[in-house]
Amino acid sequence: MPMNHTAAARKHHGEAGEPIVYRDMVTPLGEMRLVASGKGLRGAWFTDQASLPPAEGWTRAESDPILEQARRELEDWFAGRRRDFEVPLDPVGTPFQHEVWRALCQLDFGQLASYGELARAVGRPKGAQAIGGAVGRNPVIIIIPCHRIIGADTSLTGFGGGLPRKQALLRHEGSQYLSRNPRARRVCDGQAQLPFEQPAFDWPPA
């Protein structure tokens, strides 16, 4: 999927005069907010995420073509009709963050990598901690698949959308975790569950 280079200096994911549109969609893991510029998808967050930016200055647009493409592709992904994404991306970030996010996009459906492996993939073998920071600031959840990053010992580690969601997303892609604890380890290589199986919890969590 193409990714534009959008500088991190922009505030609230849109500089003055830049039209930013958004819409919300329902998913099996809770409501998501999709945000787009004229160049591509600017962000995708679950609406209960702490990192969700305020919608100040944005315009709600149910028929925007980029937002509609993202909504349709996510819907197909959850339904098992799609394993990758084609919607153009325009996330706000530093050059280093963009480098990490591009590397994340190289991970195929069901393919996992550790922070150390990702660091080596971007040519910074000693930069696992910095890699973790860039992964944690991913503004396009699922489509830029930060949920596929785990610990070197296969531990679940963290996820901006919450560990119950990470557990469910990885289960959808064939990796089984019996616990939502960040130290939980993958127990086996399973089969991808297509279409998405509704997890045994409701969103938002109590």
Image (cartoon, rainbow, N blue to C red):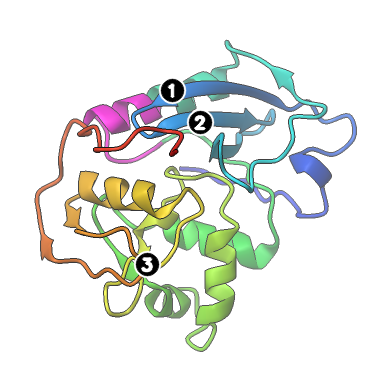
Label placed on residue 182: 3
State the separation of the CA atoms marked 2 and 3: 23 Å
Q: Could you tell me which residue is drawn at 43 percent across and 22 percent down?
A: 26
Among the 4 quarters of the image, the one containing residue 62: top right
Q: How many marks?
A: 3
Q: Mark 2 points at which residue?
A: 32
Relative placement, left or right, of 145 versus 94 is left
Q: Could you tell me which residue is drawn at 43 percent across and 39 percent down?
A: 205
Quarter of the figure with the C terminus: top left
Q: Could you tell me which residue is drawn at 70 percent across and 61 percent down?
A: 94
Q: Name the residue under label 1.
A: 26
Q: In terms of sequence position, does the residue under pointer 2 or pointer 1 come before the other?
A: 1
Contact (Cβ within 8 Å) of mark 2 with mark 3: no
Residue range of the region highlighted in magenta in the rendering = 73-85
Mark 3: amino acid: Pro
Q: Could you tell me which residue is drawn at 42 percent across and 72 percent down?
A: 118
Q: In terms of sequence position, does the residue under pointer 2 or pointer 3 come before the other?
A: 2
Q: Nearer the viewer, mark 3 or mark 1?
A: 3
Say few, some or many: other residues with alpha carbon within 10 Å of mark 1 (under 14 / 14 to 19 / 20 or more).
few
Say few, some or many: other residues with alpha carbon within 10 Å of mark 2 (under 14 / 14 to 19 / 20 or more).
many
User: Quick check: 172 above or below 65?
Assistant: below
